[in-house]
Image (cartoon, coloured by chain):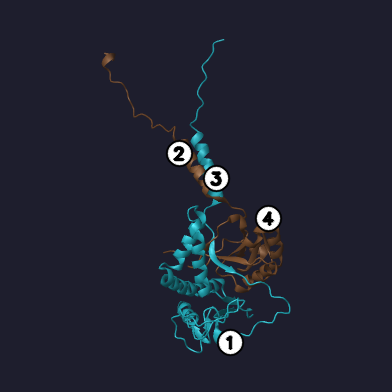
Chain colours: A brown, B cyan
Amino acid sequence: MSKFRKKKKGIPAVNTAALPDIVFMLLFFFMVTTTMRETNLVIENPRLPSATEIKKLEDKSLVSTIYVGKSKDPNRDGVGYNKIQLNDKISTAEQVPAFIFSKRDKLAEAMHPFMTTSIKADKESNVGTIIDIRLKLRDVNALKINYSSTAPAN
Amino acid sequence: MARRENPEINAGSMADIAFLLLIFFLVTTTMNVDSGVSKKLSEKPPADYVPPVIKEKNIFEVNINRNNELLVEGERMEIKDIKDAAVKFIDNGGGIGKPSENGTPGKACDYCQGDRSDDSSDHPNKAIISVQSDRGTGYGTYIEVQNELLRAYSELRNRLSKQRYGITFDELEESFKDAKKSSEGLNQVDALRKKVEDIKTAYPQIISDAEPTS
């Protein structure tokens, strides 16, 4: 009798042996195409203004970024949209030259004229703050500026 | 002792590990390309610098007050109208241009299509746009105005480039960039650079930031 009993045959399990390969491939893709976030934002992520005449910043190593916006911790830094963040701290415009020099130290002197300062400022910031930064940048001859903005969505 | 066969290593959790790594990278990295409005600052003038006298008609004055309202050449204006006003001003070509560096006297603008009126700019290379803002002006408005002014320039540059070389200035710059990168494009680089320079000197971007009011 047992000869004719139907063999119990469930649905075979899907072979997942190739799953790690797929995931690793994704992983490598992301590792190659992305860059590490260098600084922690002490200010809230600035809502960038939108503009059409924008240029891409080509070489990340030549870019130093200055953030302007509202502090995440108003008890410590005060309120308002005009807080300047250099590296990891809230700073003042007076510290901008030191910041630029520290960025320059990392690069060969021949590259200095190609360095760009990217200003990531919130829409609600005041032009006065930006002008203060700009005057300091001019003092240390960091003349290339990029006002970070987003392309309009359409 | 009985020799046992090597048991296979269980690789079932490999996917979990890889997923963990993947999620870690997804969270800690950014993929957005930085882009924005580029500007070159003028160098710091020496202490005894006397600014040159510029004729009133060659200056296009834009004022932004602390309520983000615009005053263009003494009249109130909306942001959307400023581009056309700037185009009209730059492209006026009412007189002769700046003498070139090697001493040849300036010529009248033969590619301008403006009104050639006597109370607007003489030549695109003499036309200065001066933006004065208040310290309390919103940054968003300021960038919007800068953007509109840059749009005015790119409109004129595109027009001239199309007229002279059959393609827009954006396309011209794009092909110049491509030629620089590729090895076959090397023989074209100089020709393209000349074209780009030609358009740029025909309509130079002169946007200055005046001292802010406070």
Circle 4 is placed at which residue position?
A108
Left or right of A81? Residue B186 is left
Identify residue type, mark 2: Ile
Q: Residue at x 68, y 61 (%)?
A: A100
**Disc 4 packing (10 Å; few <14; some 14–19; many ≥20):** few
Q: Which mark is residue A22?
A: 2
Q: Disc 3 versus disc 4: distance between alpha carbons?
A: 33 Å
Q: Position of residue A20 (x, y in %)?
A: 47, 36
SS at circle 3: helix
Label placed on residue B24: 3
Residue B164 quadrant: bottom left
Q: Residue at x 50, y 37 (%)?
A: B16
Look at the numbered discs 2 and 1 and tell me whether their residues touch, using CB distance below 8 Å: no
Residue A15 location, x and y as percent?
40, 31
Amino acid type at circle 1 is Lys
- Give amino acid for label 3: Phe
Compared across the picture, whether B156 is left or right of A9 comes to: right
User: Pointer 3 indicates a residue of which chain?
Assistant: B
**Residue drawn at x 66%, y 63% as measured from the top left:** A75
Q: For marks 2 and 1, give the one nearer the viewer.
A: 1
